[in-house]
Image (tube, rainbow, N blue to C red):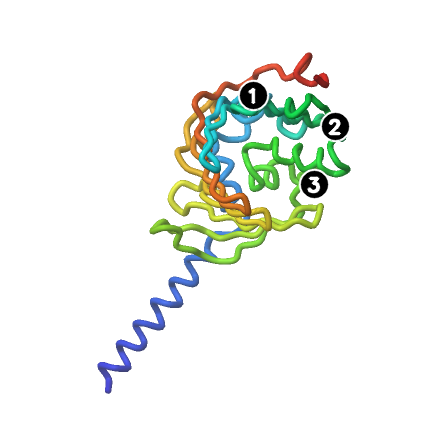
């Protein structure tokens, strides 16, 4: 009986320590470490823009994509496919979308869509935005849900609430503090192969699972501080 009581007591202690280890890390601790692992606040401040040359594989097609991002300011993307070229641009509160087929046409982005792209321009992620930009952040609150095993990797699971009302669940690696996965009504996005680009860490492989199916994005080249002004922001 004493042996059984001892084993039960050991098991309960192990469970208690396991729970305590999750919450020993606060949201602030996780966010601060995420900022540090991404390169730090000072290095990020030197990155005014990011240009990505990407290959996107979706629905059996391979697309060549150029994405230019100015965090919190502008978003531009050009997609080339055998069927033609499409572009989207958001700058401030305005934006447009262009398609070359079946006949070339340019249209204004629907109300509110430009802001969604601007939020997407913050390529260092919601935890960085929340921790560094604080009251100016698009994220109003981050809470710790617990720990999660993500394909064998221990992760912290957090929920980020945006001021717009949207909610995002994030899996942050316990090992290196970088975001491995986000889940939202739009789908699940996995982030892999982080590499240093101009002093900050940028994922070079992104796998998106959504209503359209699986979308694989591979970054072929990345460059910081590329000018987004001028003709890129002008409507075609």
Q: Is residue 3 left or right of residue 175?
A: left
Q: Residue at x 55, y 47 (%)?
A: 211
Q: Is 226 situated above or below 14?
A: above
Q: Position of residue 165 (x, y in %)?
A: 70, 50
- How far, Cα to Cα, is label 1 from label 3? 21 Å
Q: Nearer the viewer, mark 1 or mark 2?
A: 2
Crowd tier of the residue under label 2, counting other residues whose Cα lies within 10 Å: few below 14, some 14–19, many 20 or above: few
- How far, Cα to Cα, is label 1 from label 2? 34 Å
Identify residue for label 2.
107
Q: Nearer the viewer, mark 2 or mark 3?
A: 2
Give me the disc on residue 135.
3
* The residue positioned farthest toward the bottom in the image shown: 1
Q: Is residue 10 left or right of residue 54?
A: left
Compare residues 200 and 1 and report the one nearer the observer: 200
Residue 6 image-quadrant placement: bottom left
Give me the disc on residue 46.
1
Screen quadrant of the C terminus:
top right
Crowd tier of the residue under label 1, counting other residues whose Cα lies within 10 Å: few below 14, some 14–19, many 20 or above: few
Q: Position of residue 85 (x, y in %)?
A: 59, 22
Quick one: label 2 or label 3, which is nearer the N terminus? 2
Screen quadrant of the N terminus:
bottom left
Tell me if label 1 and label 3 are in contact, CB under 8 Å: no
Q: Secondary structure at mark 2?
A: strand
Q: Residue at x 47, y 23 (%)?
A: 199
Q: Position of residue 212 (x, y in %)?
A: 54, 43
Q: Is residue 91 left or right of residue 204?
A: right
Q: Residue at x 53, y 52 (%)?
A: 158
């Amino acid at each position: 009986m004493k042996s059984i009581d001892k084993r039960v007591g050991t098991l309960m202690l192990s469970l208690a320590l396991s729970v305590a280890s999750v919450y020993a890390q606060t949201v602030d601790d996780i966010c601060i470490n995420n900022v540090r692992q991404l390169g730090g606040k000072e290095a990020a401040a030197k990155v005014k823009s990011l240009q990505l040359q990407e290959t996107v594989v979706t629905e059996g097609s391979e697309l060549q994509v150029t994405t230019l991002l100015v965090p919190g300011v502008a978003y531009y993307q050009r997609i080339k496919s055998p069927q033609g070229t499409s572009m989207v641009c958001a700058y401030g509160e305005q934006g447009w979308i262009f398609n070359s087929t079946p006949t070339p046409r340019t249209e204004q982005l629907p109300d509110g869509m430009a802001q969604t792209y601007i939020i997407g321009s913050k390529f260092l992620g919601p935890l960085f935005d929340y921790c560094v930009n604080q009251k100016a952040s698009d994220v109003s609150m981050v809470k710790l849900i617990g720990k999660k095993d993500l394909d064998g990797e221990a992760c912290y699971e957090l929920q980020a609430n945006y001021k717009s009302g949207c909610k995002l669940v994030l899996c942050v690696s316990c090992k290196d503090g970088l975001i491995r996965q986000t889940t939202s009504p739009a789908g699940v996005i996995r982030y892999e192969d982080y590499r240093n680009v101009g002093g900050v860490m940028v994922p070079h492989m992104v796998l998106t699972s959504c209503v359209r199916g699986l979308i694989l994005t591979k970054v072929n080249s990345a460059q910081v501080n590329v000018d987004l002004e001028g003709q890129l922001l002008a409507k075609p």
